[in-house]
Image: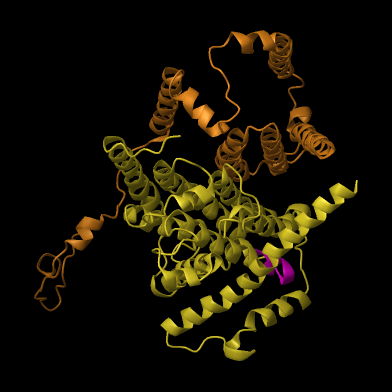
Chain colours: A yellow, B orange
Amino acid sequence: MFEYLNIIFSEIYKILYLLIPILVSVAMIVWLDRRVWALVQKRRGPNVVGPFGLLQSLADALKYIFKEIIIPASANKTIFVLAPIITMTLALAAWAVIPFSENFVLSNINVGILYLFAISSLGVYGIIMGGWASNSKYPFLGSIRSAAQMVSYEVSIGIIIINVLLCVGSLNLSDIVLAQKKIWFVIPLFPMFIIFFISALAETNRPPFDLPEAEAELVAGYQTEYSGMMYAMFWLGEYANILLMCAIGSILFLGGWLPPTEMYLFDLIPSPLWMILKILFLFILFSLVKAIVPRYRYDQLMKLGWKIFLPLSLTWVIITASYLYYFDLLPTN
Amino acid sequence: MIAHTIFFYTFSLIAVFSSIMVIVSKNTVHSVFFLILDFISVSCLFIMIGAEFLGMIMLIVYVGAVAVLFLFVVMMLNVAQQKNQWFESRTGYSHMPIGLIVGLVILFELIIVVGGWKYKPNLISSSSININQEVTNTHSIGNVLYTDYIHLFQLSGIILLVAMIGAIVLTFRKRSGIKRQSYTKQISRERLESVQLVEVKTNEGVKIDD
């Protein structure tokens, strides 16, 4: 009996050891996002609360906690409350398989990349449920939009993942990282990296693909009826998802925790820090895109997903497969 | 082992409960949500017996794509308002016989499947595939799927392709009088062909034809 308790407690300790830094970094990343956005537009951004405004997200969180949670009278109450919880749980659950170094990973499962893909494809439910349960026009339209958008871009992300898996020969995330010891996949698969980056923007509803919450047309999309802590949970989940997409991108293309080359200077930096630096690099790209690019029209978005990205990534699968086959580089075991 | 049993019974109870709720719940959207819960718990059961690849694919395909489209359609139809019309329809129980026949067929098939379980050991020993415990099940599925069953695999691919083309052909309508955006046309537009200087005579105006 005590053995079981011991296992349970040590697991909970490990989970908290991973989750609390992630939650804190989500708060910090919101600050970073706003700061980058402001710098591009020659503003100052949040700079009042704490040094450099670092505690701004904390102040925001406090404000959300003390605000009243309003549930509309005509809303479907259970699903309305469930939606933000699901969004946040899924966004955090996916971090279980992300490897930060060779040993620093919560669960090193065989089908890690499939798990990540499955969890990120479940993320759409939080949005659909929130939009439908609000029983109001704008949230519903927003959720319908996002459902179509996320399903379409998942297809191209899946095919890009197949490209990488062809070069690795394993679904395990640590194996994917270790396969990039000679060369990061961003170099041989550069076009796929670009497509992955854009699809990740669409998958996380980031600008320029933030049509589900296009404020000019839909007020705030699926979040319109949410207030207080429930809104904050949507918001946290969204940013945790963005960080997750950056982590997936750095594992698939930027060599995860590996330094660029084997060098004494690079080895001084511990491997989790490499991973974090890569995630931050991708995130800054995300926020630069937000500041620079105007929003897409809905039909353009769909056209980009189905008529350009899907054929392109499928063709690239054939090219990669035939290259590997012809030069006898296919990973076999 | 105790933990394994606890997890198994939790997931299977959730699976049975939610599949009952799919049929019983009055709101159609709730039914779809229970169906999703059912899929998720079944994929958890798959993972528990070691078929992790199958479980994950089940999550990705059924929950991530099929059920989303399901939900999409059900929400658009707004069926939530026509509560429980099945039992209150004016025609009485005219559709009951069809339902009963379908139910009987499914029951019959289930009985056959459960009966076939008895011969499972013989079937496993007679099959030509030897299962290697060392290889992960992603590898072993791949080894079988692309060698022994390649023709069946490609056949199912063709069936899916035909179904997809069929759906597109059925819903495709060519409408006239729609203005479509063409990027190449827009980009290749020159000033000379789009701007024109017109001399307007007083009291006559210009005739615009476009």
Quadrant assignment, res B57: top right
- Report the magenta residues as a range: A227-234
Q: Is residue A50 above or below residue A208?
A: below
Residue A23 on image: x %, y %: 66, 68
Q: Residue furthest front?
A: A264
Give the prevailing secondary structure in the magenta stretch: helix
Quadrant assignment, res B33: top right
Q: Is residue A2 above or below residue A286?
A: above
The mark tally for this picture is 0
Residue A3 on image: x %, y %: 86, 48
Residue B180 in view here: yes
Residue A233 located within the stretch drawn in magenta? yes
Q: Is residue B183 above or below residue A283?
A: above
A8 left or right of A156?
Answer: right
Q: Residue placed at 43% from the left, 43% from the top?
A: A162
Residue A197 located within the stretch drawn in magenta? no
